[in-house]
Image: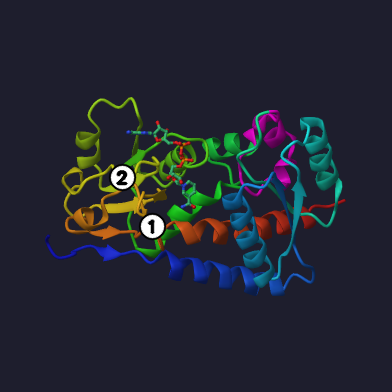
Amino acid sequence: MTETAARIIDGKAVAAAVRAEVAARTATLGYRPGLAVVLVGDDPASAIYVRNKDRAANAVGIAARTIPLPASVAEAELLAVIARLNADASVDGILVQLPLPPQVRARAVIEAIDPAKDVDGFHPINVGRLHEGVATLVPCTPLGVMKLLAAAGVSLRGARALVLGRSSIVGKPMAALLTAADATVTVAHSRTRDLPAECRRAEVLVAAVGRAELVRGDWIANDATVIDVGINRLADGRLVGDVAYDEAAAVAGAITPVPGGVGPMTIACLLENTLRAAAARRSRPG
Ligand code: NAD
């Protein structure tokens, strides 16, 4: 194996800087922004994730609370909870942990959230604003990727960027943000004809697929910047990304590790979105 050539983009350090900035700004507000996290059912991974969000929020001066609901919850009941949170002046951000049980339509729930409190940026109004290039609440993971690219000093204007994956949570908003930053963006997905060839053209490659080590070293252009959003658990318990890290690091110019790359950015950006929602909502007249 060739020695690692790529610069490692340290998501832990960038996330810590974002959290510190949120804490500093929150301390000047004169109130604690409120974040409500709705957790349906008892999926252990979701529970851990929600607990981490709670802890991280409280550490930066955001008052976070979790609203646990049983897996059997009726859609109408969940919608009533959302309506209460929409009307609660102490709540600036509302997040519903996905996935939801089959009797609840996730779409109906997302659309019920007040767009001004939609700190996940999944409401169609916020999605539309993002695609219009209007400042809005943006999904946390792609927002985190943009911050990593900025921290690494990657120039996006005119750059050829490839987004691998077209989900509403990562791929699509990622492509919109890169386009807004003046990159020339291609979106590749499971039906793309020649994935390696598309990848090889990219100066900036963002992989958000959910397939362990799909992207090989010989798919990557010399000196490209590689951002690996994927989180995949192997049979032996190891956590790996969507990119074969060692192979990629031998050719790339810069690369994010898994774990310690994009992962820590998601919660940091959720905190930033909550602060942003609080500042915007509470400065509105009336
Ligand atoms: P998803 O399953 O909703 O979407 C995956 C996308 O990849 C789809 O658009 C699909 O077309 C594409 N795809 C699937 N198989 C493919 C293949 N063989 N070749 C090309 N494209 C293929 O997943 P998602 O929610 O976008 O998440 C993607 C990955 O990112 C997952 O590993 C997830 O765990 C991870 N993730 C990480 C964070 C974080 O905080 N770091 C946040 C969200 C998601």
Pick out the residue farthest to the front. Answer: 236
Pick out the residue farthest to the left. Answer: 2
Q: Secondary structure at mark 2?
A: loop
Q: Amino acid at mark 1?
A: Leu
Q: Secondary structure at mark 1?
A: helix
Residue numbers of the magenta segment: 103-124
Q: Is residue 193 left or right of residue 273?
A: left
Q: Quadrant of residue 151?
A: bottom left
Does 190 appear above or below 121?
above
Does 112 appear above or below 235?
above
Asked whether 177 falls inside the magenta stretch, the response is no
Coordinates of residue 181 in the picture (x, y in percent):
42, 47
Q: Which residue is mark 1?
A: 149
Instruction: Tell me what residue is drawn at x 59 percent, y 34 percent.
Output: 128
Q: Quadrant of residue 194?
A: top left
Instruction: Tell me what residue is drawn at x 22 percent, y 53 percent.
Output: 248
Whole-angstrom CA distance, mark 1 to mark 2, is 14 Å
Coordinates of residue 163 in the picture (x, y in percent):
36, 40
Asked whether 110 falls inside the magenta stretch, the response is yes
